Each structure stands twice: as C-alpha cells, then as structure tokens.
Image (cartoon, helix red, strand yellow):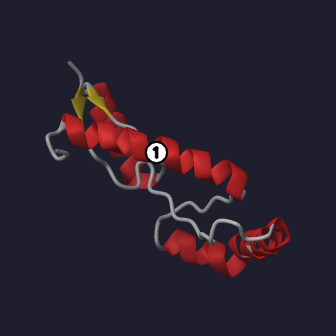
Amino acid sequence: MSRAALVTGGSSGIGLAIARLLREEGFDVSMEAWRGIAVPRGTPRSAVSILESAIRQAIESREFQRGSENLFVRPAFLRAEDFSPLIAQEDAALARLMERVGQKK
C-alpha cells in the first residue's frame, strides 16, 4: 500500500524538494492547484476567444510574471477546451485522495 502526502507548491522551489524527498520515502506525491476564469454555458465562442486572448496577454506580462514569482506560483495558460477536461480529471483525483485518507463520505 502506498502512502499519501499533500505538498503545496510541489512543482518548484522548496515544495519540489519536499515532494521529491517524500516520493523517495514511499509517499505518492502528485497534485497541482489550478485557478481559472469561467463564463456561463452558452457564451458565444467569439466572446470566449476575446477573453482567452486578454487573459493570455495578462499572464504573459512582465508585471504578472514578477507578481507570480513573488508568490512562488508558476502561471500557465490553457484554452477553455483544454482547461475543462483537466479540471475534471484533477477533481476526480482529489476525490479519490480524500476518500483514501478518510475525508470523503
């Protein structure tokens, strides 16, 4: 049976070092925290495209990149068609983890 541990920020810096150490010790370490912007179902694709373009531009700006570094986060951009399935997959993985550690009824 594998053991599980939760490490926030496990993709860079000290969080990555901790995640690697825990993995060496037999813990199953893998999880990212995602954030996104949602629009109502049925929003015209043209409107979604405009929003995606503006969000991508903001994320790629030097100011946003510096702010992200100060918060020790790694920004990434995904289009809606790629982000939605990723979140569904992550939600399912988190639900399995919560059940495994006895936090989901």
Q: Is residue 84 above or below residue 38?
A: above
Q: What residue occupies the far right of the structure in this picture?
A: 46
Crowd rating for badge 1 (residues with CA inside 10 Å; few <14, some 14–19, many 20+): some
Q: Secondary structure at mark 1?
A: helix
Res 29 visible: yes
Q: Which residue is mark 1?
A: 90
Above or below — where is 37 with respect to 31? below
Give the mark count: 1
Q: Which residue is painted at 57% across and 66% down in the image?
A: 36
Residue for point 35% across, 54% down: 8
- Identify which residue, 70 or 86, lies in the foreground: 86
Residue that protrudes farthest toward the top in the picture: 1
Residue 84 lies, in percent from the top left, at 60, 52
Q: Position of residue 19 (x, y in %)?
A: 35, 41
The N terminus: image quadrant? top left
Residue 68 figure quarter:
bottom right
At x 69%, y 71%, the residue is 59
Judge whether 26 appears above or below 58 on screen: above
* Nearer-the-camera pick, 55 or 27: 55
Q: Tell me which amino acid carries mark 1.
A: Glu
Question: Could you tell me which residue is drawn at 50 percent across and 41 percent down?
Answer: 89
- Quadrant housing residue 100: top left
Residue 62 position in % (x across, y down): 71, 77
**Is residue 93 toward the left or the right of residue 22 in the image?**
right
Q: Quadrant of the C terminus?
A: top left
Q: Which residue appears farthest toward the bottom when viewing the image? A: 63
Answer with left or right where residue 22 lies relative to residue 12: left
- In-front residue for pair 18/7: 7
